Image (tube, rainbow, N blue to C red):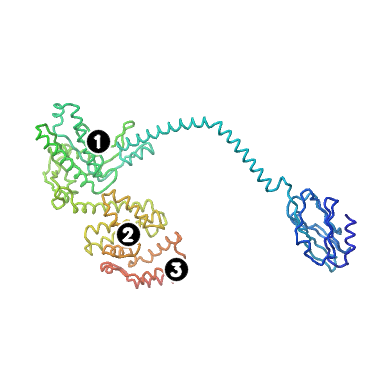
Amino acid sequence: MLAGAVSAQSNLIPGEEPVLARIIVDGDSVIEFPVDSKDPDLLNKKQMIFDFRHNNLVLELASADTLVYMYYLEGFDKDWSPSWLTSNYKEYTNLPAGKYKFRVRYTDLETLGGEISFLDFRVLHPWYLTPVAIILYLCLAVLIIWALYAQMNLRFARTQFMLEQIINKRTEALIIEKEKSEALLANVLPKNAADEIMLTGKATKIKYNFVTVLFSDIQGFTRIAEEMNPEVLIDELDKFFFHFDSVAEKFGIEKIKTIGDAYMCAGGIPEKNRTNPVEVILTALEMQAYMSKLKEASEIAGMKYWDIRIGIHTGTVVAGVVGQRKLSYDIWGDTVNTASRMESSGEAGKINISGTTYEFVKDFFLCEHRGKMPVKYKGELDMYFVSGIMPELKDKDGKPNKKFILKMQRIKLQDIEELITKMFEDEAPPNLYFHNASLVKNISGQVDLLANAESLPEEEFINLKLASVFLFTGYISDYEKPMEASFLLIEEILPKYGFDRENVEAVKKLISNSFNDQQKSVSDNILYDARFDYLGRVDFIKLTDKLLREQTEYGILPDRKTWIETQRKLLINHEFITNTAKLLKSVSLEDQIGSLQLHIE
């Protein structure tokens, strides 16, 4: 090798750059290069390739005797040679597969020096390490694994199938039994109590401050029981109580229990509401009418007839589940005792209510004052007989008419507003700084004022009031599509409170118009003015900052300056529609613009 190197040097004119003279492969094969070539890129035009078996290389240079060198094989060496070398060749043994570039630094220690990249070459992988071979190995491994898996799967398939059959049968049996248990529990207990027991194993006792309790009792049941066949007696009672159950369910009244011939139910539990005294009396009237029809049929047939006494009282109770094995939902308290006294102090075929209940239902029903009647352990209490619905509130069949329903809906508005307010307080994200319970209350209050001032008809007012309450509820669950989320809540909640499809569609239409900035009716105008009432309030700057903070956290607004400009344009273009709203605004829009400008500065 050294002889070859010297021979190469002898052909170089002193002072010229070194050139690659030859490559010795595996100590015996030699690749010669013309040292007098005028093409500096000769070696780089085609990359040299070496088989993996020929990976021992000696790279020799032809150069002047005065030059010294540093060598660096890019792709193999970590750095240049640690010092200058006088040898004009570099040997590499057992080069691994890969791409390489041979680079040389040279100098004569006086005037000549530089760096040259001589050769790009590649050492091939052995055939058993080529990508094709690796892919074949992987395929073979997968095939072996699959074969083993198939063998194992075949071995355990029969056992697994048998186990699955056993599990499926047992699971199916458990599901059936679970459904039976849940259905039985739901029939015995209110839904919320049943759900709580299934989750925790027990139900919490709850105090309710506004509950109406109904007691009914078959007049002369003891005498009838002595004269009637027991099986017929039980069948008759079962028929009565089945009808009473259906009537109670119709009006959302909770059946508590039956004791012999006594039937007990209550309104206002487990879901609290303000209309339960009216709903309980409607239930009592239907029970009374049913028994009256049976009485008439029995008299015509010359048979013994059944008659019923009903007593009702409104007050505070404690409700909960009692028992360990045989669970029952029951209520306790002085209200229950007083309702029982109302029943025992009544008369056959009549509905006897307390003075307390009367105060809540006097605008709906005709009531006959009985005066103060003695009650055991209670002294004297005011009592009233309910004779029916007010003439102006019933239709030809004696059923509640549209006016009656509107009066009830007006009361239910308070329950719904309370529900939505609680929903905002319990479920709303903490960063709803503007669209919160306070805003709902403000819009609802403004709707009350404006609707009253504009003499809005009762039916339109109810739909408008509902729209004001549900307007921003969608922000609780879906900030990007609040209107659609509000619609879902409307569809879910309103039917539970006795509102029909017509109400649902009317409320959704008002909310849609509000979001789309369309005013097509007086109700639309009122909702628009109530929604933007904050623009005319003294705390406008504080509220607009809350809205800015909210929308910033939700990634809607870019910066404060843009927001201020948006609010300024809103104030410039905004006009209240109703005369009442124009009169009610505390600060003129011009002054608000001025305050906003100062706020910027």
Q: CA distance from mark 2 to mark 1?
A: 43 Å
State the image quarter where residue 577 is shown: bottom left
Circle on res. 257: 1
Q: Quadrant of residue 463?
A: bottom left
Which image quadrant for residue 80? bottom right
> Between residues 294 and 237, which one lies in front from this camera angle?
294
Note whether 516 is above or below 389 in the view shown: below
The three-letter amino acid code for the residue at tag 3 is Thr
Question: In the image, residue 217 lies at what x, y percent?
Answer: 17, 35
Q: Earlier in the sequence, mark 3 or mark 1?
A: 1
Identify the secondary structure beneath mark 3: helix
- The mark found on residue 511 in the picture is 2
Q: Amino acid at mark 1?
A: Lys
Which amino acid, mark 2?
A: Ile
Horizontal relation, residue 80 to residue 312: left or right: right
* Residue 47 badge: none
- Mark sitting earlier along the chain (2/1): 1
| Residue marked by disc 3 | 562
| Residue at left offset 33%, top offset 66% | 537
The answer to whether residue 301 is above or below residue 539 is: above
Give the vertical position of 431 relative to 156 (above or below).
below
Query: Marks 3/1: CA distance?
Result: 65 Å
Question: In the image, residue 114 lies at what x, y percent?
Answer: 80, 65
Disc 1 secondary structure class = strand
Task: Give the vertical position of 424 relative to 179 (above or below).
Answer: below
How busy is the neighbourhood of tag 2: few (under 14 within 10 Å), some, or many (20 plus)?
many
Q: Which callout, 2 or 1, points to the residue nearer the camera?
A: 2
Question: Is 21 in front, or is 365?
Answer: 21
